[in-house]
Amino acid sequence: MTVTVVLADDHPIVRQGLRNLLESEPDIKVVGEAGNGIDAVEITHNLKPDVLVVDIMMPGLTGLEVVRQISQRSPGTRSIVLSMHGTEAYVVSALKSGAYGYILKDTGPSELIYAVREVIKGKRYLSAPLSERLIDAFIHKVEDTKEDPYDTLTNREREILQFVVEGYTSNEIGKSLSISPRTVELHRAKVMEKLGLRNQADLIRFAIKRGIMSLGE
């Protein structure tokens, strides 16, 4: 059986390296690539691969949001998140979004291949430094977490939130999403209301804390 994979990373050289690594295995085939979060969702939804390998920080939509949407639109696809961050908050967010694997970027290349083989069996896989024994604790924490205001945002509101924290203007966002600047402003106001935020500084702090953007990537 051939395992099909889609790669999502905004750096072409990284995608090429991941493709070469995975396709060195005779039973793994990369069937698609994406350079931003919006394309990642569409390509994965259309191709419905066995596995999606996605960088946690990408333009358009974060890797975590891509995983969340794919878990709904292509539930047969198992997602593996690639990240520089090994903190509990990021791992919990990834698992809560529907990820089956979480790989740290500084681990050995063979670990990604192993992770792909584990997740297609329906198992969860975390990089060794995160310790496999913590998986159950992470899952229980996710299940016990109170409702997150971020979960109340619609897909369009999440898209606009991502664009806003990346510094795009309402006009630029409107052109990208084929909606009017006024509609962008209405969605943005709704986002601020739902998240209980008052200004741009609050929004940036929320984005960093929630993993929508990072000072380190």
Image (spheres, rainbow, N blue to C red):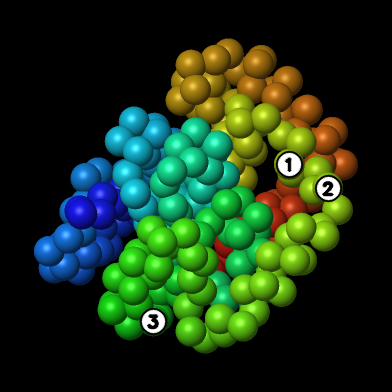
- Left or right of 184: which side holds 55? left
Residue 167 image offset from top left, x and y in percent: 57, 42
Residue behind mark 2: 147
Vertical placement of residue 185 versus 214, above or below: above
User: Mark 2, residues whose alpha carbon is within 10 Å: few (<14), some, or many (≥20)?
Assistant: few
Judging depth in this view, the residue of 211 and 100 nearest the camera is: 100
Residue 74 image offset from top left, x and y in percent: 45, 37
Judging depth in this view, the residue of 164 and 147 nearest the camera is: 147
**Secondary element at image label 1:** helix
Vertical placement of residue 215 versus 38, above or below: below
Residue 28 image offset from top left, x and y in percent: 20, 59
> Which residue type carries mark 1?
Asp
CA separation in Å, label 2 and label 3:
33 Å
Residue behind mark 3: 107
* Residue 84 seen: no
* Residue 138 seen: yes
> Which residue type carries mark 2?
Glu
**Secondary element at image label 3:** loop
Residue behind mark 1: 151
> Which residue type carries mark 3?
Thr
Sequence order check: which comes first, mark 2 or mark 3? 3
- Left or right of 88: which side holds 73? left
Q: Are marks 3 and 1 in contact (CB under 8 Å)?
A: no
